[in-house]
Amino acid sequence: MPVKQIHLAAQFPSVQHTVIWSDPAAGSQIDFDSFAHLARTAERGKFDFFFLSEGLRLREHKGRVLDLDVAGRPEALTVLSALSAVTTHLGLAATVNSTFNEPYDVARRLATLDHLSGGRAAWNVVTSHDAFTGENFRRGSFLDEADRYTRAAEFLHTARELWDSWRPGDFRPDAASGEFIRPGAGRFAHRGRHFDISGRFSTPPGPQGHPVIFQAGDSPEGREFAAADADVIFSRHGDLAGGQAAYRDVKARLAKYGRSPDDLKIIPSVSYVLGDTPAEAAERAEEVARAQVSPQTALMLMEAAWGRDLSGYDPDGPLPDIDPVPESVVTKGHNLYRSRGREETVRHWRKTAEERGLSIRELITEVTARPTFVGTPRQVADAMNEFVQSDAADGFVFSPNVVPGGLDELVDRVVPLLQEMGVHRADYTGPTLRDHLGLKPARRHFEETP
Amino acid sequence: MTRLHLAVALDGTGWHPAAWREPDARPAEILTARYWADLVLEAERGLLDFVTVEDTLGLQTSAFHRPDERTDHVRGRLDAVLLTAALAPLTSRIGLVPTTNVTHTEPFHLALGIASLDHASLGRAGWRPQITSRAADAAHFGRRTTPQLTDADVLDSELIAARLRGLFGEAHEVVEAVRRLWDSWEDDAVIRDTSTGRYLDGAKVHHVDFEGEHFSVRGPSITPRPPQGQPVVTVLAHAGTPYELAAAGADVVFVTPQSRADAVARLGGFERARQRFPRPAGEPIRTFADLVVFLDDEPGRAAERKQRLDEVDGAVFGSDALVFAGTPAELADLLLDWRTTGLDGFRLRPGALPHDLTAITRGLVPELQRRGAFRTGYEADTLRGLLGLPRPVSRYAPVGAGG
């Protein structure tokens, strides 16, 4: 069996407490130069794509803007458009919310990025329903949680209809005949539960036809959405067995949509810490963890779980003896406890801390740790390769701890090893993100209905 | 003498509907970054203050107010904010001013997009908010309806403004909400204070709590304050209602005089709007006149070219702005004459690209420089700097904070 190629990607990290802004090497989180540095580094490493997340409301803690973590970022599609001018092959992936946007506007912006970048655009489709974020929008908060995925699915289908409203050859200006476009180009009509729209679409689709579609949810609904409609799914499984189980589950969902396992790439988000020796790497990893969870951050995350002020507690002492306040929300815009639920989170934390005698800060460091490859460059390259060859993933999104230089070591020291091993490209073989990911051309609607 | 300001308005292959059929036109490339980069780099070589990039949410139409089925004019376009963002790293001095719709879009997203363009261009972003003039565009969103302009309305700017008055009122609110969001982070909000573990000074990041008739926005922005503090807001205005929008919220207003006397009249109309919407001292508004230009060195040649294009199109091209056809020297005469009415500058709409753009940068600009009426080098690296506009302190900063 031929070896699988590892798909590598980079995320510009923001607003997670894992970004070590206090590092002496840390640079601006907003200057374009920081984005350009990280994107150029990823392109130097022949990565598949560069990824930006999104958050449409600053998080608040105890009634004030959360001041401990990095906050503030540019609009994703705008900065990616600017990056298209300083990169040549790197895929450019934007997270764009399907709740606080409209299909017409999003479809034209993504088509624009695909044109500007020569076929390198991707869209991470996310959903949201919270009233907290809705306060920033005309639309406000209007969506039942149950409708999140049905709206997202219809949003995506509508965007695809808009991209398909121009057929190949519709945009072919011919001065001799005087015909700029074919008659009726761009005409569309969509009638659905969430969207009822019609007219003429302003923008012919870009080189990829449809941008590459990402899906980030790890819930059963999220996986089903990805199996039906996405090209890439982000997962969050750090250990081999968990990764393999998720991989099998997701890939098995594809057949009923007439898709093959290769049509959907599974790419978890990870980090890395290198050292010249295993011991040095382990030591640096501990330093990183300490820097990521300051005493103030540890207490803040504990307060978020407990739903009450804990400012009298010592971060280096035991967990609070008082009980959480059920239903009380002191932190808004944080999704740390969404997967497990608050009560269950608290129970789990208390048990872990008691069993292992952990302080507040030690516990928070433990429970918020991200999947991280730690070791010498050789160890990290081998571990990454094992993860992919044993079908726990198709690749990785690296989210560095320090901006903008946090990817340099990986590209300088690990990527060459992967290239030597024959599991990562020595150079790009095509111009588009679909080429990098080995995806088939987009299935366009008009090809199915003659 | 004080120098005048010059901008060009870029759209498709130029403002004449048959320009795309000229031998030097590149119509098949209007969806590529390279095409626009060539144009904007040419404008920057000509030391122009800024370029504007037109946009419409819907497919272009030949009439201002309703869709059509024509196939013989330029159709298909890119989002102007993203397009100008792609041009930002390729340029270093020229201002970049995209048009956006404000009727069907979210003010929060607009604020982020323009602020992000300002970050990517290191302080060269502007913005032209535009209301929707075509009722048919509303069906692209399916959430509201907007007034339908009649064929009689479009002959008179005051009738247009009257029909669309509600949308202009909403545009006032959008501009105000966007400006508040740009100010919502004070310049020194990021403190990185390791001793307290704080990245931000939370007291310097503000809810904007905009409550209008049409919408509300809580804030703060998710994008830190842009390099210019406030990117340059521009408004194209033909009548009393849009003059009020410009007076209340713009840094630059584009007016469309048909003659020198008309320039006097329009600036008077704008001045009356300014009295109704007074701005704080120290907030100047630059006035620009729009002109569509066809330029050739040989006398009479530009008029011939325009006439030839009209014949190709089968109609005599006219515009909301005066259509000028002549030599660069004749245009320089006109600009220097009109500016004595109090105009600060001109936004020139090239009739055909690239011909009339290079005639501006290589013909008109040297002519104006010879007369001492235009810069010979960029004197600032932000758009506000080029326009002589001060960088405002955030409205949320404590009184007395430095600017």
Image: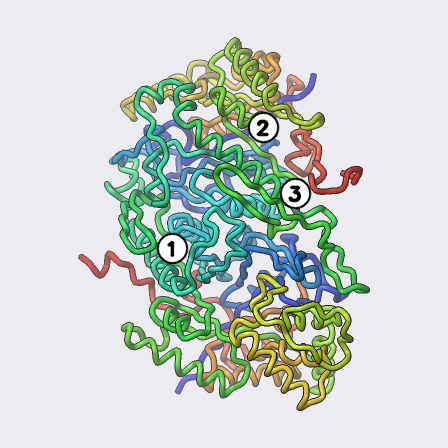
How is colour applied across the structure in the image?
A: rainbow
Q: CA distance from mark 3 to mark 2?
A: 17 Å
**x then y, percent, for residue B366:** 60, 23
B133, B4: nearer the viewer: B133
Would you say A317 lies left or right of A246 here?
right
Residue name at image x 66 percent, y 83 percent: A376
Local SS, label 1 = loop
Q: Is residue B239 above or below residue B380?
A: above
Residue B90 in sight here:
no
Q: CA distance from mark 1 to mark 3?
A: 38 Å
Residue A144 in sight here:
yes
Q: CA distance from mark 1 to mark 2?
A: 42 Å
Looking at the image, tell me whether mark 3 or mark 2 is earlier in sequence order: 3
Q: How many marks?
A: 3
Q: Is residue A307 above or below residue B389?
A: below
B355, A324: nearer the viewer: A324
Discs 1, 2 touching: Cβ within 8 Å: no
Q: Which amino acid, mark 1? A: Pro
Residue where numbered disc 3 is placed: B183
